[in-house]
Amino acid sequence: MTNKALIAMSGGVDSSVAAFLTKDMGHDATGITLKLFDNEDIGEKREKTCCSLDDIDDARRVCLKLGIPYYVYNFKDSFKENVIDRFIRAYENGTTPNPCIDCNRFIKFEKLIRRAEELDFDCVVTGHYSTIEYDKGADRYLLKKSVDSTKDQSYVLYCLTQRQLAKTLLPLGTYTKEKVREIANELGLINARKHDSQDICFVPDGDYAKFIEQYTGRTYPNGNFVDTNGHILGEHKGIIRYTVGQRKGLGLALPHPMYVKEKNLDTNEVILCDNNELFSKELYATDINLITCDKIDKPIKVRARVRYSQPEKDAIVEQIDDNTLHIVFDEPQRAISKGQAAVLYDGEYVVGGGTIL
């Protein structure tokens, strides 16, 4: 029996080729775009954001060329609640969020799968560069890194549950980006050479603080930059404007480079330090999701990443309760940031991960 597949299409080349591959595998394919926000909602007038009218038009034209149905689903309320509001709260609470992970967790692989099930689809398809495998011996679905290490997106998919992995197809995991563009070009797809999106979709210019102020209508008071001994070094322009490890944009004339170490919400202070003080060997992570097992029963060796762009590093992980991991690296890591994801690997496979405390 042919599987009915619901393909999440952004209007970009990756999801378009994923749609082609899904149909080519014999699935009964339907394309959909998730309308996550209006440009007016984020104070952006130009059509340069994800799920813009231009992107919707590109996705529609690709589906027409592939001969598959196409629809637009309005997920704006869920996106506001689960992604934008969480993003703002994180910055206000002094942490550094990863909204792409929240979008995958709460929208693309939770709400969309539920919608697909309501409409009798068998699976959801996305254009992420990773692979899902089923291990018969362990009776578990596994998440594997992409063959294209430069595009691998397993880090932002660590939150997928067994139920979600079972309902998801990731056709691009065995392709390089170059090959994907080649396929799109051969098919004559309108977006074959379309640029990849780089910034957070609802902050297209990368200015997070400006977005938060415009979106909330709130202002964030100036306060003091201080060193680790409490000596005042100057004035900051609002605590949401700074992230751990930051050096540029502080607006200070200092005798030597200094970096953001942490933020004190009680005193509205941004604490600066020398580069060598940014390094630490251990972290705790909460809100965890494990893929290769239900529970880590004893300390195990893993490779771990504490940000999307970081290479994996050797570490020991121990699960200390149902929702907390303790990770100790072999070597100190720079600028471990609260709110980011710590993701664990065993070779090519994602063990799991959690949010850094």
Image (cartoon, helix red, strand yellow):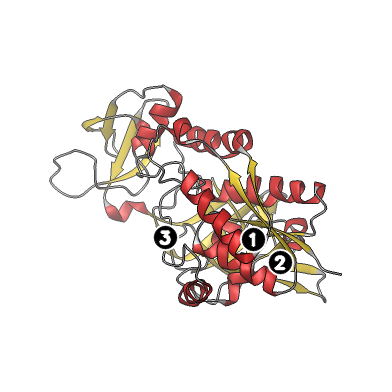
Q: Is 51 located above or below residue 61 in the figure?
A: above
Which residue sits at x=48%, y=34%? 88
Q: Is 152 located above or below residue 244 in the figure?
A: below
- Residue 35 image offset from top left, x and y in percent: 58, 42
Give the side of residue 2 with respect to residue 74, left or right.
Answer: right
The number of numbered badges drawn on the structure is 3
> Where is residue 21, by image quadrant?
bottom right
Query: In the image, what residue type sits under mark 2?
Result: Thr
Which residue sits at x=24%, y=40%? 250
Q: Which residue is mark 2?
A: 292
Q: CA distance from mark 3 to mark 2?
A: 25 Å
Frontmost of labels 3 and 2 is: 2
Viewer can see residue 92: no
Which residue sits at x=36%, y=24%? 220
Which residue sits at x=64%, y=66%? 170
Give the side of residue 335 with respect to residue 274, left or right.
Answer: right
Front-lying residue, 344 or 165: 165
Q: Which residue is mark 1?
A: 352
Front-lying residue, 350 or 15: 15
Q: Residues within 10 Å of mark 1 (few under 14, many from 20)?
A: many
- Residue 283 image offset from top left, x and y in percent: 52, 53
Q: Which residue is mark 3?
A: 333
Q: CA distance from mark 1 to mark 3?
A: 19 Å
The disc at residue 219 is none
Q: Earlier in the sequence, mark 1 or mark 3?
A: 3
Query: In the image, what residue type sits under mark 1?
Result: Gly
- Residue 8 image offset from top left, x and y in percent: 63, 55
Frontmost of labels 1 and 3 is: 1
Viewer can see residue 314: yes
Q: Are marks 2 and 1 in contact (CB under 8 Å)?
A: yes
Front-lying residue, 45 or 201: 45
